[in-house]
Image (cartoon, coloured by chain):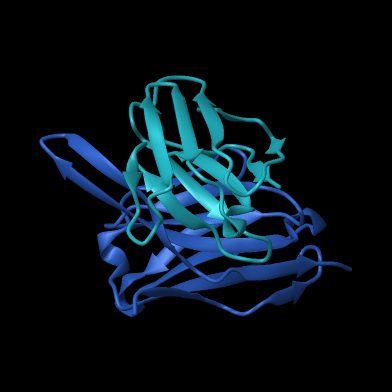
Amino acid sequence: EVQLVQSEAEVKKPGESLKISCKGSGHSLTSYWISWVRQMPGKGLEWMGAMSPTGSDIRYSPSFQGQVTISADKSINTAYLQWSSLKASDTAIYYCSRRREDCSNGICFRYGMDVWGQGTTVTVSS
Amino acid sequence: DIQMTQSPSSLSASVGDRVTITCRASQSIHINLNWYQQKPGKVPNLLIYAASNLQGGVPSRFSGSGSGTDFTLTISSLQPEDFATYYCQQSHGVAWTFGQGTKVE
């Protein structure tokens, strides 16, 4: 079965660092864009950033640029989202998702985010 | 940044109703527009990709249309399991963005 399996919930204090993971099962992350999406309590979905299939292109929403880092270890088919210094306002559920893109002669057909991780709840509280 | 504006923010409907949700982009995104459904406490689920393509396994009562800046998600006959929040999302720009969501209740 094709899945994205995320790491367990975390409870952290403000100022602490954190790295959460998203492991592909049944498919290779090197074939997809992997995005991270935040959902704060009772709020909508916010796209944070994404990494290209090759890892050569990592892009961030301006709202999250400099606040988080997206990375991956292709050898273990795992993507990561990390913070160097958490704030209480980082309390949220974080989802990873995959998206396929088919390009030919410079024209790309972009599919939607069809597989999502189960979400990682991050609670930041003193 | 490309901004996505959904309307309405919420709507009240009954089983059997035809429901239409619109999404407007701040600039042309061609057909790079997807629709998702999210139920409380659940993971978002892809319904429509590239503006009008039905994702596998999604009931045919869901349909999408539009291109450029204006898009529509239509539920032809609302079913009890369709009460949820719906989001549009563009993947045209360097930064991808979601609409603010439409709650169908």
Of all residues, the one furthest to the front in this rendering is: B16
User: Whole-percent x and y of residue B97?
Assistant: 52, 38
Is residue B68 in view?
yes
Is residue B91 in view?
no
User: Whole-percent x and y of residue A114?
Assistant: 39, 58
Of all residues, the one furthest to the right in this rendering is: A126
| Colour for chain A in the figure | blue
Residue B12 image-quadrant placement: top right
Residue at 40%, 41% (x, y): give it: B63
- Report the side of A77 relative to A36 (left or right): left
B94 or B60, which lies in front?
B60
Q: Is residue B30 above or below residue A47?
A: above
B98 or B71, which lies in front?
B71
| Colour for chain B in the figure | cyan
Residue at 67%, 44% (x, y): give it: B103
A75 or B83, which lies in front?
B83
Residue at 71%, 38% (x, y): give it: B10
User: Whole-percent x and y of residue B42?
Assistant: 61, 65
Q: Is residue B30 above or below residue A65?
A: above
Residue at 63%, 53% (x, y): give it: B84
User: Whole-percent x and y of residue A27?
Assistant: 29, 73
